Image: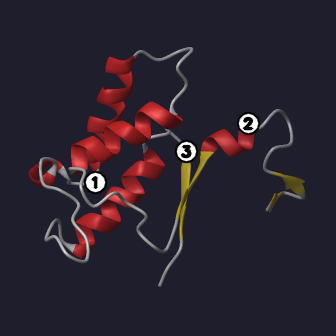
Amino acid sequence: MLFNGKTADAGGGSMARRIGFVTQDDCLFASLTVRESLHYSAALRLPSATMTRAAKEQAAEEVAATLGLHSCKDTIIGGMFVRGVSGGERKRVSIAQGGAAGPGRAWCTAR
């Protein structure tokens, strides 16, 4: 992918750190709660050198609040055989996982 004629990793990867990508298909663990899913994503994607575990969890909570996921944060994601959050909440969890890494922009694909 090119941005202004340059690859996303040009310049030490600074562009790649500022952009999040949200997939069409929600690739979420059905057995995790919304909170667990966001904390897990933040723990893996945010830098350990500059952020404590508590700071990563706080970042995940802030993204969840911004996207209106506070009412379902203790509900499991669910899947084909287990009832969980609604389709809209599921999509917002996917967006929140992209936003938990702190990008300035998120690319969301449409169905």
Mark 3 nearby-residue class (10 Å; few <14, some 14–19, many ≥20) = few
| Residue at x-position 47% and y-position 17% | 51
Q: Quadrant of the N terminus?
A: bottom right
Tell me if residue 17 comes above or below residue 19 in the rendering: above
Position of residue 17 measured from the top left corner of the image (x, y, whole percent): 65, 39
Q: Please give the label number shown on residue 104.
A: 3
| Residue at x-position 32% and y-position 61% | 92
Provide the secondary structure element on which disc 1 rests.
loop
Contact (Cβ within 8 Å) of mark 2 with mark 3: no
Residue furthest bottom as drawn: 111
| Residue at x-position 55% and y-position 25% | 47
* Residue hosting label 1: 67
Tell me if residue 59 comes above or below residue 8 in the rendering: above
Mark 1 nearby-residue class (10 Å; few <14, some 14–19, many ≥20) = some
Residue 61 visible at all: yes
The amino acid type of the residue labelled 3 equals Gly
- For the residues labelled 1 and 3, the Cα–Cα distance comes to 15 Å
Residue furthest front as drawn: 81
* Residue hosting label 2: 14
Provide the secondary structure element on which disc 3 rests.
loop
Pick the residue in front: 77 or 87.
77
The quadrant where residue 56 appears: top left
Give the mark, 1 or 2, whose residue is nearer the N terminus: 2
The amino acid type of the residue labelled 2 equals Ser
- For the residues labelled 1 and 2, the Cα–Cα distance comes to 25 Å
**Side (left or right) of 50 relative to 18:** left
Residue 65 visible at all: no
Pick the residue in front: 92 or 43.
43
Position of residue 29 measured from the top left corner of the image (x, y, whole percent): 33, 57
Tell me if residue 101 comes above or below residue 30 in the rendering: above
Position of residue 101 measured from the top left corner of the image (x, y, whole percent): 49, 39
The amino acid type of the residue labelled 1 equals Leu
